[in-house]
Amino acid sequence: MSLPEPRDPSGPYRIALVCLGNICRSPMAEKVLAADLERAGLGALVRVDSFGTGHWHVGGGMDPRAASTLRVHGYLTGHTARQVTPGELALRDLVLAMDLDNLEELHRSAGEHGLDASRLRLFRSFAPGAGVRPEVPDPYYGGDDGFTAVLTMVEAAAKGLTGELVTRLRG
């Protein structure tokens, strides 16, 4: 899958990860992808952040179960939840939704505001073997094992995306 061209070739490639509330999946994906990019030597060339399509958790921290799962596996956990806006979408080179519902919401917003919808994708579509419906399920209403499963999915997608970014940005 080819990556969209950078909006500003002189600046960093900007990626946003989006879920519903920005307290579980998208911040986990943000931290994992940022760590992978650093290990690949792309930390200065790619900027990663995350948002929610909903407003319920704006200003709050990461879900404690998500933070605990990340911490146990050696990832950073600092986070403040934010809601995505058309202005934020317009600044990103690639916007990656965690599931089809959030992708649909992003497409709706892009259409309403004349934004480039070709920059919208599912995050897990970058994971090898993700299947026909490459979604990251919401672990919010489940137990700790759901957060571990999400981390496994996110790590695979981050690894696949990092590989594509290495090819794109390092040639």
Image: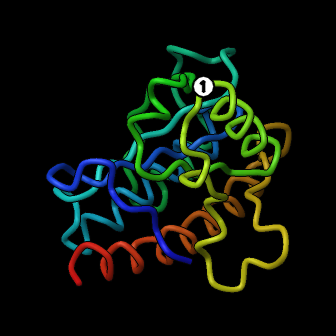
The relative height of residue 90 versus residue 87 in the rendered view (above or below) is below
Q: Nearer the viewer, residue 49 or 150?
A: 49
Residue pushed farthest front?
Answer: 114
Q: Residues within 10 Å of mark 1 (few under 14, many from 20)?
A: few
The relative height of residue 18 versus residue 126 in the rendered view (above or below) is above
Image coordinates for residue 11, horizontal then vertical, percent: 18, 49
Task: Check disc 1 and report the residue beneath it.
Answer: 113
Q: Quadrant of the N terminus?
A: bottom right
Image coordinates for residue 143, horizontal then vertical, percent: 81, 47
Q: Residue at x 16, y 56 (%)?
A: 44
The relative height of residue 118 versus residue 114 in the rendered view (above or below) is below
Q: Nearer the viewer, residue 93 or 124?
A: 93
158 vs 101, left or right, is: left
127 vs 29, left or right, is: right
Q: Nearer the viewer, residue 49 or 3?
A: 3
Q: Quadrant of residue 66?
A: top right
Q: How many marks?
A: 1
* SS state under label 1: loop
Q: Residue at x 23, y 84 (%)?
A: 171
Colour treatment of the image? rainbow
Image coordinates for residue 152, horizontal then vertical, percent: 63, 69
Q: Quadrant of residue 168?
A: bottom left
Image coordinates for residue 40, horizontal then vertical, percent: 26, 75
111 vs 64, left or right, is: right
168 vs 54, left or right, is: left
Q: Residue at x 39, y 59 (%)?
A: 74
Q: Residue at x 63, y 57 (%)?
A: 121
Q: Nearer the viewer, residue 1 or 122?
A: 1
Q: Amino acid at mark 1?
A: His
